[in-house]
Amino acid sequence: MKEIMEAHFRELDEAARTKKQKVAWCTSVGPAELLKGMGFQVFYPENHGAMLGATRMATDLIPLANAIGYSPDICSYLTADIGSYLKGESPISKAYPGIDGPPRPDVLVFNTNQCRDVQDWFNFYGREFKVPVIGIQTHRGVGEVTRAHIDSIADQLKAMVPKLEEVSGKKLDMEEFKRVVGLSRQCTDLWKEVLEIAAHKPSPLTFFDGTVQMGPAVVMRGEQRAVDYYKLLLAELKQRIEEGVAAVDGEKYRIYWEGMPIWGKLRELSTQFAELQACVLASTYCSSWVFPALDADEPFESMARAYIELFIVRDEDYKEEYFARQIRHYGIDGMIFHDAKTCPNNSNDRYGMVERISRRFDMPTLVIHGDLNDLRCYSEEQARTNIEAYIEQLAEKRGQ
């Protein structure tokens, strides 16, 4: 993992420095396959935002973005990333000596399937770097995905091509585009298999492992090295199952995590759950990079379907049924909802979902209030106490 992630960032840095390849910045579930198929090196600011959170740099950088008018209530990936740019500090330069930070973009490409904030985020950099900002406006609150939805997104993808050709100086090569989509499909299938292996009892994998292992699925989909990485990981996980190795020794409780990770507290939370013999083994978040609709024979249409079938853009009925399938598949005992202060789009506890899930499955649930990056929104002491009480509740339900 360390080796291929370093290679990813060094290739981006070289492209930006030497101008041998154009660099596109892309939102996490933006049209990466199209960009890579057209020869761009692709950088993901949301990945950089997560790095800022995991390294605990974010909380100090967010106020810099607030000071130029970006509210503390909006996405803390956005505010941390802009703060990083303003201060000229990045975890990339600390992890990989010789790299100054994120590569300068030639074009910025967004998809609002995550939220509207990504558009405003990219527009900031468009003004700073004076490069084009283009994107896809995605439908939200989608129940059944219809032909009209898919055609709408596919048309927007196709409309990007002339501008991307202008920036790259190359015509779209359909065969190369299809090859990249095919690799992306292989990557997503393997990543799905990795996540689903956690259904085994005891689970060989935790949600906290998943937040690290998802790296190639996020930034290297469409590349052979991501496919190769997940084949190796899958083989290792299967071996752990054969040898009876559990991710959490003495696994007693199986927990589902709904919502964003609290990046700056992953280690503390992982340790606490392990000490309580509770395995947080599945999540909506890590499954966000599973795109079974991708099809190399229909690249535009299948990308459109993949990007609008995402959990985050679906309506409440779809989400409740999705949770029901996950609870049954993984044999879940309890469900924890993370209400992230600056990410309402990924906080699904605000419209009665918690109560509906509790009643439907006669399952204790817990809401943790925090944030993905801004640790000022998170009380560690309160969260620790609530988690301890919650596990006691699960034990009482079992009569232990």
Image: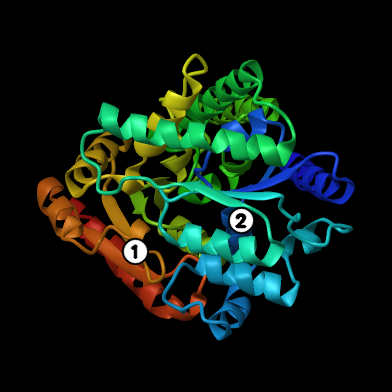
Residue 283 or 308: which is nearer the viewer? 308
Can you identify the residue that label 1 sits on? 344
Residue for point 56% across, 24% down: 181
Q: Position of residue 26 (x, y in %)?
A: 59, 47
Task: Please name whichever residue, 374 or 364, is drawn nearer the observer in this view of the structure.
Answer: 374
Q: Position of residue 25 (x, y in %)?
A: 64, 49
Which of these two is toward me, 258 or 280? Answer: 258
In the image, is residue 186 above or below residue 166?
above
Circle 2: residue type: Pro
Q: Is residue 315 visible?
A: yes
Q: What element does badge 1 sit on?
A: helix
What residue sits 58% from the left and 37% below the top?
A: 32
> Could you tell me if the residues under marks 2 and 1 are in contact, i.e. CB atoms within 8 Å?
no
Q: Which mark is residue 115?
A: none
Could one spot residue 253 in this view of the protein?
no
Of the residues under marks 2 and 1, which one precedes in the sequence? 2
Question: Which residue is at 43% across, 25% downward?
Answer: 302
- Label 1 neighbourhood size at 10 Å, few (<14), some (14-19), many (20+)? some
Give the SS element for disc 2: helix
| Quadrant housing the N terminus | top right
Q: Is residue 234 left or right of residue 353?
A: right
Residues under labels 2 and 1: Cα distance? Answer: 19 Å
Q: Nearer the viewer, residue 353 or 38?
A: 38
User: In which quadrant will I find the C terminus?
Assistant: bottom left
What kind of residue is marked 1? Pro
Count of picture labels: 2
Residue plotted at (49% across, 58% down): 118
Q: Residue most toward the left?
A: 359
As drawn, 176 above or below 134: above
Q: Residues within 10 Å of mark 2 (few under 14, many from 20)?
A: many
Q: Would you name the residue on which mark 2 appears?
A: 45
